Image (tube, coloured by chain):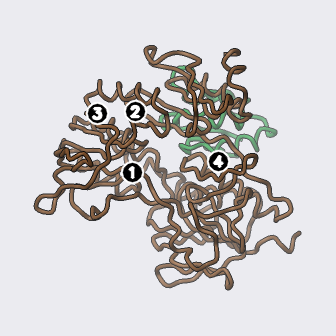
Chain colours: A brown, B green
Amino acid sequence: MTARRPSRIAVVGASAAGLSTVEGLRRQGYAGPLTLIGEEEHLPYDRPPLSKQLLSGAWDTARLQLRSADDIEALGLDLRLGSPAVALDTRRQEVALADGSRVGYDALVVATGMRARRLPGTEGVPGVHVLRTLEDALALREALAAKPHLVVVGGGFIGAEAAAVARGLGCGVTLVTDTAQPMGDALGDELGAMLRAVHTENGVRIATGVLVDQVITDGGRARGVRLADGRILAADAVLVGIGAQPNVEWLAGSGIPIGNGVQCDATLYAGSGVWAVGDVACWPHPRTGEPLRIEHRTNAAEQGLAVARNILAGPELATPFDSVPYVWSDQYDLKIQIYGRTRGADEVRIVQGSFDDGKLVALYGKNGRVCAAVGINMMRALRGYRAQVAQAAVLDEVENAA
Amino acid sequence: MKISIDFDKCCGAGQCVLAAPEVFDQRDEDGVVVLLDPNPPSEQEENVRQAAAVCPAAVIKVEQ
């Protein structure tokens, strides 16, 4: 077994998942050479606040830093920030960086995450924003300071949160989404309709069930968007929040299986001494075999720790990654929390509270079994349903017990 | 072992309560963490370190 224990480990990606991996390795006793490679210049920082406290101005940039410089120093890393990995040679066990340097490894962890998806032809167009990095958020914050009319393209987490913040800052906001309701993908139509009412009460204009054709420019600057049904929405600024795509291009030709992210086995191992963690990792559900790829903050931390453990355990003792996905969203005075996976749910039952109370817990069911629990302003109560989500409990029994 | 918490940054995820229920709880009204025991016994150390590692807002600091 000891012969298999790697003597040099490299982690590519210095955000939440990469940080969790290197911390996990050190905590579990790995004292050998450990390289952390990051595309961005910054020490690891947290992304969920980008569309919340940082955008609103409640927090400054320093509050986003996940660990102090001293804490990072104490990890004893070969830290390579500001130079992305550009190629992987699994035969020679080397990562090539953009600055021309190479990093050798026995075990490699891919934690390269995602980048914001853009509307075609909008990259670099003044007045068009995406929201994925610290620089993105600071640029949008600066734009919102002039109280523009903001058109938000996309009704997911980023779009809905940014719309709420922009209203709070006094901007006019129109939100456009191709789903039937804002956050419809994550919450379904019933709770999505409730959320829509809150956004409307707060002055957000909403267009649902319609795609955006293109950003309209005037003098090279964004002036609005044209919808697929021909309508034109005027804007001084446009935020495109239409999801993200995995950063896997640098793995081309490496032999690492790429599909919807990095294709891993149940232990998050992708073969050839390579593991993947966080948003970029796709792995089969330990019980159903269904491929999963989860873009949540907590998943990044959990997978980093799991892969650190699996690398050090060796192949015979590596264990499948299993967790209950968790994500939250803050909008106005709503705190929305989700355990499990709501997509594919065929029913929704509110088991505590109600929307009129301003707080509730809803169970999402699929084929009669609990697949997710959603809470609005009911954190402690919601946590009580996590076990039922984990067990995929029979919905009727859980509801009767509530 | 000594625990300190940046309460203002807590996002109320409750991951700490799942990792170390004897050390952490959440406030009813907003889910913000409640530190039940700022100096927990050493048998709680692994749980507490796990809680700090999975906290999505990185608000839990553990010192010896």
Read off the residue under disc 1. Answer: A242
Under mark 3, the amino acid is Gly
Q: Tell me the mark number nearer the camera, choosing from 4 and 2.
A: 2
Label 4's element? helix
Subunit bearing disc 3: A
- For the N terminus of chain A, the quadrant is bottom right
**On screen, A136 above or below A33?**
above
Q: Tell me the mark number nearer the camera, choosing from 4 and 1.
A: 1
* Mark 3 burial class by Cα count in 10 Å: few <14, some 14-19, many 20+: some
* Residue at 74%, 34% in the rendered image: A391
Question: Does label 3 or label 2 sit earlier along the sequence?
Answer: 3
Subunit bearing disc 1: A
Read off the residue under disc 2. Answer: A331
* Cβ–Cβ under 8 Å for marks 4 and 2: no
Indicate the position of residue A210 as horizontal and vertical percent values: 32, 43
- Per the model, the C-alpha gap separating discs 4 and 2 is 26 Å
Read off the residue under disc 4. Answer: B53
Residue A26 appears in the figure:
no
Q: Tell me the mark number nearer the camera, choosing from 3 and 2.
A: 2
* Mark 2 burial class by Cα count in 10 Å: few <14, some 14-19, many 20+: some
Label 3's element? helix
* Cβ–Cβ under 8 Å for marks 3 and 2: no
Read off the residue under disc 3. Answer: A168
| Marks 2 and 1 belong to one chain | yes
Residue A11 appears in the figure:
yes
Indicate the position of residue A128 as horizontal and vertical percent values: 26, 55
* Mark 4 burial class by Cα count in 10 Å: few <14, some 14-19, many 20+: many
Q: Quadrant of residue A76?
A: bottom right
A112 left or right, relative to A366: left
- Per the model, the C-alpha gap separating discs 2 and 1 is 18 Å
Question: Does label 2 or label 1 sit earlier along the sequence?
Answer: 1
**On screen, A2 above or below A168?**
below
